[in-house]
Image (cartoon, rainbow, N blue to C red):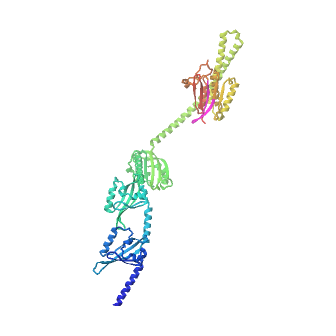
Amino acid sequence: MEKQLRRQKDIISTYRRALDASSIVAITDSQGIITYVNDNFCRISGYSADELIGHTHSIINSGYHTRDFFSELWRTITSGQIWRGEIRNRAKDGNYYWVETTIVPFPDEYGQAGSYVSIRHDITARKEKKELKYRLLFDHSREGLIIARPECTFVEVNKAACDMLGYTHDELMLLTTPQITVATDPLLPIATDRLLREGSYEGRLQFCRSDGSVIDTEISTAIYTDENGESRSYMSMRDITERLKADKALQESERKFRALIENSRDGIAITNENWEITYLSPAIYEILGFTPEELKNTNAAELLHPEDLETHLPLLMELGTGQRTHATRLLRVRRKDGQWRWIEATATNQINDPAVGAMVTNFRDITERKEAEEKLALLNQSLERKIEERTHELKESNKALQSFSYIAAHDLQAPLRVLNGYAAILLNEHSAGLDEEGREMVGTILHKTKQASQLVKDLLAFSRASHAVMQRTSVDMTEMVRAIIDSMAMAGYDITRTEVHLHDLGTVSCDRGLIQQVWTNLITNALKYSAKKDRPLITIGMENTLTGRVYYIKDNGAGFNMELAPKLFEVFARLHSGEEFEGTGIGLALVRNIIVRHGGRIWADARVNEGAAFYFTLPQ
């Protein structure tokens, strides 16, 4: 018997040593007063056995767990049941440590709980690692995370939630759930009801930002019990405001495009790579007389004219196999009533586009245009023949006119020279036999024959300018005008008393001879109409404008009434009488003819007795 008792004591001693070596052990009485602690308890808590024995475990209470947590613990062990759980304690130096705890109640001789043995294991490292992992996931999550109490105050919020709602961490922790949700959001009562009834909710919800703006979010929330046995709600939130805007814009864009497609007179067909129709826009009814449903799943090639199918079949195969991605062709397509219509079709292979995954063909009915083009081609052929005939007739007419002008001019010059010669002889050799009236009559004959001769010369010049073949060369306009002025001085024009200001005119591509005629006529007119002024002034220059160069010649002479300006460049049009200023009325008509042939334009500005200004342009 003694051996058995000694053996049992040895076994118990062995168990105790093993337990003391591997665990943190404490024994309390029925009131929770510590009656025993092992060395591991002292080591991890930092207290000596004397400091611990006689006290309750409140000496190492960290304040982390709630009163309800410990109340539930005591209810369990006082009812004779074993309690297991994790507890955070505080050591003597203030550091916290976690222990995995098992509390076993031992009854006394009366069957009541007489003492409690607590067996603990240090899990601080494991808890810290788990807490660190949780904290990293919580703090760095791209989704907003909020943990709240049943009374809607916050236990913790992460940075993403703060950024999403526009608050700092401390500001958000002072708020409650109702303060950040939108009271008028129709989904709020649904979310609240489902969370309370089912313990979770997933869906959309609106939140108020600190600046008063509203954001749309997708949330996932659930109610759970934490390690203290307290009810908590966990919510993750993702801002989908921009996505909803984009979705709304996409839907609006889709509605617009669908409206455009369904109301367009052009047709749109969607087919697979074998040209089997999967979609047709409503325009097909106006174009071919079929409804979209009648042609669905039909092969588009069956509608083509046999000749066009034979011609374009290789192209259709290349498009279907992706050898070509785009092509536009004119085709004849059969209407429902059997007529053939000309269709302009543009096909695009978008099989590899994930958003399309099909062949897309845009087409329009161009039958009327095709018929009009054919009629126009026939008309053009007819017109070309008529133009050739009229051109030939015009050339012959111009040749005859030039011959007539040349012959008429020479034939007119001969009698004028005879009249002029006889009148001159009569005046010079027989003047003594003439009275005053006779001499005046002979003088008039001389003047009129000279005038008629000049008119013939001007007509010849006008004819040559109208029919001469232009030969453009680069011309220094300043040198040309200076040479004209010098030649006029040598020809007897009164240049010396006229003040001429010649500015730089630059270089231009033109027919030298014709433009020289322009300047000669304009300078002659300026000299003639300013000759009666006390100080004649002529200014010649060029201005660069937005539309190109503008050449001008201005004088301070007789000018003219601008109401008569529209007739200024007509043949034989004169704004002054022959007695006042000599002239044939052809010079300015000749100038206009030359400028127009060069592709330019000419105009004038004047005031009576205040001078005149002539402007003209020459294309560069």
Magenta stretch: includes residue 554 = yes
Vertical side of 496 occupied by 266: above or below: below
- Residue 76 in percent (x, y) is at 31, 73
- Residue 211 in percent (x, y) is at 41, 52
Magenta stretch: includes residue 303 = no
What range of the chain is rendered magenta? 540-556
Vertical side of 365 occupied by 35: above or below: below
In the picture, residue 78 is in which quadrant?
Answer: bottom left
Q: Nearer the viewer, residue 512 or 73?
A: 73
470 relative position to 48: left or right: right
- Residue 524 in percent (x, y) is at 64, 25
Q: Mark yes or no: residue 402 visible.
A: no
Residue lying at the far left of the rendered structure: 110
- The residue shown at (43%, 59%) is 160
- The residue shown at (42%, 63%) is 138
In the picture, residue 131 is in which quadrant?
Answer: bottom left
- Residue 603 in percent (x, y) is at 57, 29
62 relative position to 380: left or right: left
Q: Nearer the viewer, residue 298 or 183?
A: 183
In the picture, residue 89 is in which quadrant?
Answer: bottom left
Q: Quadrant of the N terminus?
A: bottom left
82 relative position to 140: left or right: left
Q: Main secondary structure of the magenta part?
A: strand
Total numbered labels: 0
Q: Quadrant of the C terminus?
A: top right
Q: Mark yes or no: residue 419 visible.
A: yes
